[in-house]
Amino acid sequence: MADVPQLKEVHDKARPDPNNSANVPTSHEVQIKTPDTISGMGHRMKRKEDPRFLQGAGRYVDDVKLPGMLYLDLVRSPYAHAKIINIDASAALAHPGVLAVITGKDLEEAGGLHWMPTLMSDTQMVLPTEKVAYYAQEVCAVVAVDRYAAADGVELVQVEYEPLDPVMDPFEALKDEIIVRDDKETKTNHIWHWEAGDQEATDKVFADAATVIKEKIYLPRIHVASIETCGMVAHWDKIKEHLTIYMTSQAPHAHRTVVSLVSGLPEQKIRVISPDIGGGFGGKVPVYPGYVCTIVASLVTGKPVKWIEDRSENLQADSFARDYHIEAEMAADADGKITGLRVHTVADHGAADAAAQPSKFPAGLYSIGTGSYDLQAAHFAVDGVYTNKPPGGIAYRCSFRVTEAVHMIERMTDIMANELGEDPAEFRLKNFIKPEQFPYQSPTGWEYDSGDYAAALNLAMEMIDYKGLRKEQAEKRAKGELMGIGISSFTEVVGAGPSRSFDILGIKMFDSCEIRIHPTGKAIARIGVQTQGQGHETTFAQIIAEEIGLPANDIEIEHGDTDTAPYGLGTYASRSTPTAGAAASMAARKIRAKAKKIAAHLLEVGEDDLEWEVDKFVVKGSPDQVKTIQEIAFAAYTNHPEGLEAGLEAVSYYDPPNLTFPFGSYICVVDIDKGTGEVHVRRFVAVDDCGHIINPLVVEGQIHGGLTMGLAPALFEEIVYDENGQNLSGTFMDYLLPTAVETPNWELGKTITPSPHHPLGAKGVGESPTVGAPPAIANAVVDALWHLGVRHIDIPITPQKVWKLLREHGVDE
Amino acid sequence: MIPGKFEYLAPTTLDEAIKLLTEHGYDAKILAGGQSLIPAMRFRLAAPEILIDINRIDGLSYIKEENGHLAIGAMTREADIDHSALVQNSYTLLAETAKVIADPLVRNLATVGGNLAHADPANDHPATMLAYGAEVVAVGPGGERTISIDDFFVDLFENSLSDNEILKEIRIPTPPANSGGAYIKVERKVGDYAVAGVAVQLTMDGDTCTSARIGLTNVSAKPIRATGAEAALAGKALTDDNIRAAGQAAAQDCDPSSDLRGSEEYKRDLVRVITMRAIRAAATRAKGG
Amino acid sequence: MSYPITVTVNGQEHSLEVEPRLLLVHLIREVLNLTGTHIGCDTTSCGACTVLMDGKAVKSCTVFAVQANGRAIETIEGVSNGGLHPLQEGFWEKHGLQCGYCTPGMIMSAKAFLAENPNPSEDDIRWAISGNLCRCTGYVKIVEAIQYAADKMRESEEA
């Protein structure tokens, strides 16, 4: 076997935190400490950013128009694996509107730009010189005066290919008969081998187990398919020698640094602007070849160049999610307590390891897969593999590889419960980590900050009348009707992350906020994260309002422009509230600390004589001796104390001491049509716990959306290739997004178990439902069919899959 | 995403349109609703040199009962069928069909004539018109002629119109008393083509089915009738056994291809299941239920 | 070759010469610079490009600009009239949008729908927007927003 990197996950011990209490109490009421006029945390505040979106005044990348702007379109490979014999651009160049055609050879001559580094320190072709390695791979770029001419130009480029056999299956790929990356010294498709946990301890637990179950679980390739595709406007100003980039980017600062390192252009001469972004979900984290071509096109022509990909390009070539072939084993003792977990996974990365993970975690946070349960030992092993598919591995609306981990543990838990003849809810309640065990050290080295899993599950059971449903199920089963109830009790891990373990290409994963208060008591705050619909312009204002009492409506939130926003690592994997939210809080507290000094000066008392009350400092025992934050702000510019600088501003770069661990319990009810195999989701109750809530209206929206992006892979979505490597589901005709008709009316509940280490007690939430929903639905369908002898069904659970099982087990309409 | 170039003509009369078709022949295509043609042109799978837009011709959009049939102008939009009280009340099979074609936005432009003329077994109206025993009226340089729906679909994307004929009207014979119809379409999601679809129109005499016509959607190379299933019902009482036999016959009548919507076996079995359901629904309506 | 057309967009008449193959959505976005209408797919599937043509909601990516000759187009920019339309209000109140990209299409679809169906049920609304895809919201609050607008519009009708 070829010499392949052998990686081991290591967790440094968290800094001891005085706030880490063993038992953080759980509540059910949203905490509100400010009045409506200030609208701090907990308020259902209408979003400040909405007016422009409602009136068609949003500014997305394709809305950017610069004088003299050109258009770029890409010629793409119709083969999954082929040598490039010749590229004839003569007919395209003869087209009146076409100005240039850029090939891999051109990029190579420009200084080795035909290859670029990936976020996982692999390399990826920008444009090929020797061969193409996936269907729809970018082959060359056409630059034209408008998008119609660019499209015509693409049709006119003649590429001669010599097709090669592709390898589409990662297990086949591991045989190393067809090599995907022959550019590498070692000719192998095995990228790396990674492990986490304790193999010896796990083996022992399995040897002693009363029950061992084993299951193969495949999570197919899916695509985030945000309604806005990816794109860029690159503008190289050759007089100023300055590059401005408008980009669909979830992480503009990181992208700026990468562009600087790859192009050699000095970083202060590059400005990346993420304007309004129409959904990200992880898909706008990678650097795609189209972006690089667009920048090069602008450098070469000296004009602004726009590239906006079509939906088919987006689905067929951009980074995918999942594609994990999982083999899991679970051990339980004689009392039905889960004792051990052993997981081996083959990870299909496509033609490059371009996964968007923190650099020390090639399999993301997959080892969180012991889930909400108190096990003794666990061992995870993952093998990354190259195949002739588009490169990548992004987190489709979830934390890194957590959907894979949770799907696995929740399916295995259900199978074990059923094997042992126990009710899946009772089985979970028995095996949950208990509140008094927090902060909980998992067998794979994670320190869960807080949780009360039983409270969430019990609430969900109450909301859906679980007992009543089981009764109904029994009655229906007696009549031959198929109804299923599925539970998922997940723990997510979000907020990457502490600098001791988390970095992207070496840049630590802190995040930032800079706040400046104006003399008239208004403020501007700039953050290092990047909304793509999560409502930051409102929620961050609410955080700051909470801390310093300025009304949220008086606080302007800015982000996305690398020239003005402080350095941050962007928004994905539900990290914004845990990192930048904390930074906003800390920066606001610095301001409050300075405000206290100013207040003391104005009131002519010592700082110790002052108390903070929502939006003002009050002299203890003299309630009419008061200075409001607005008065203090004014004084910062007109009457600042001696020895103190004027002005009222602060910046915080927050290095989180730990990740945060939102959790929840979901219960899904399905009815199955015995004739057609169609699965109807009758009800879905979702109880989420994300700690203290900033804006319940926004949180509800995040959960509804996340649940829908959990439903979609559970029942509808799959990227399908044929044996020749052709993408068969590369448009919305066959890559199926649910409409309002397929989507159920989600029922939400909540518990609130604050994070002890986060300044606001808040955790991330936007992606928990994408993680928790698919196993709830899968468990429900299997639950409906368990009595027939069905143990597992891979998602997407299509009607045909159900039909096949029904007929195999002698069930018909 | 961006179509190729073409010349655009927008005649205001049928005669003008026919003249243009005759003149340009193979290079020209009719633009009706455009909801099938324009997507194909955007992928350059269709690249006509000349587009003849017939949306400016008056008098091609109507829904009216006359002379023992329902006359539908070829340019009638699916949305108009969907909103027609006459169709809702008296042509249930047609109402159920129009409702599930594509999505509401596409239905605002897509036409009944276009849906039929495309001769695509994946479209929904062909099966329904076969079930109704409809006929279409074509206009050409030589004048008008009527074509029975049974003779209209020749092959995949091939209808029996000549190159310079245009569909003008669709006629559905008004069903006699004690008739009922149903359209069942199984789709992966709203807006999709059918995995399989069945259109049933039958007439009852007490518990006996005196006539039945059954059309199938997307389970054959061209739109077809399930003649075996029809034979299993004609003149028979609609017992569970007979309905089951009709379902099994329909499964044999069809010739589905395996694709992303489903395997051949699955589609065949679906046809069996939904044929039975559609027969039951149609029979209930025929009996006044 | 170019073809002359006259199109009224949000009440304003425009006389232009266009290539026959110019899609209506590009006429709106590129020629008339009304970028509120968005493009989300290439198979007439997503509805982000929905506008009203002679009062009917259509996917402007699947209409040629020449087909709009002599017709009246309404886009999202034409919806508010002095103040916010009840639909815009409803989407704001009920948090019916997150990234905002599908929102103009949703509002245009809903506007045409409510004109025909002023008192819809939840199912009616879900059915009416089944040609408009959203990835962010999970539709629940979009449905609530449209219900809010329907209620508000009926109230002012009755008043």
Image: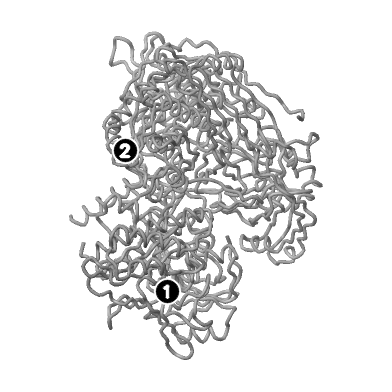
The CA distance from mark 1 to mark 2 is 47 Å
User: On residue B113, which mark appears?
Assistant: 1
User: On residue A477, which mark appears?
Assistant: 2
Residue closest to the eye, B212 or A445:
B212
Q: Residues within 10 Å of mark 2 (few under 14, many from 20)?
A: some
User: On residue A711, which mark appears?
Assistant: none
In the image, farthest residue toward the left: C159
Percent across and percent down for residue A284 are 57, 41
Q: Residue at x 41, y 84 (%)?
A: B146
Task: State the image quarter where residue A154 is shown.
Answer: bottom right
Q: Residue at x 29, y 49 (%)?
A: C122
| Residue A268 visible, this orientation | no
Residue A43, relative to residue C143: is it above or below?
above
| Secondary structure beneath label 1 | helix
Percent across and percent down for residue B77 are 38, 70
Residue closest to the eye, A400 or A714:
A714
Amino acid found under the numbered disc labelled 2: Arg
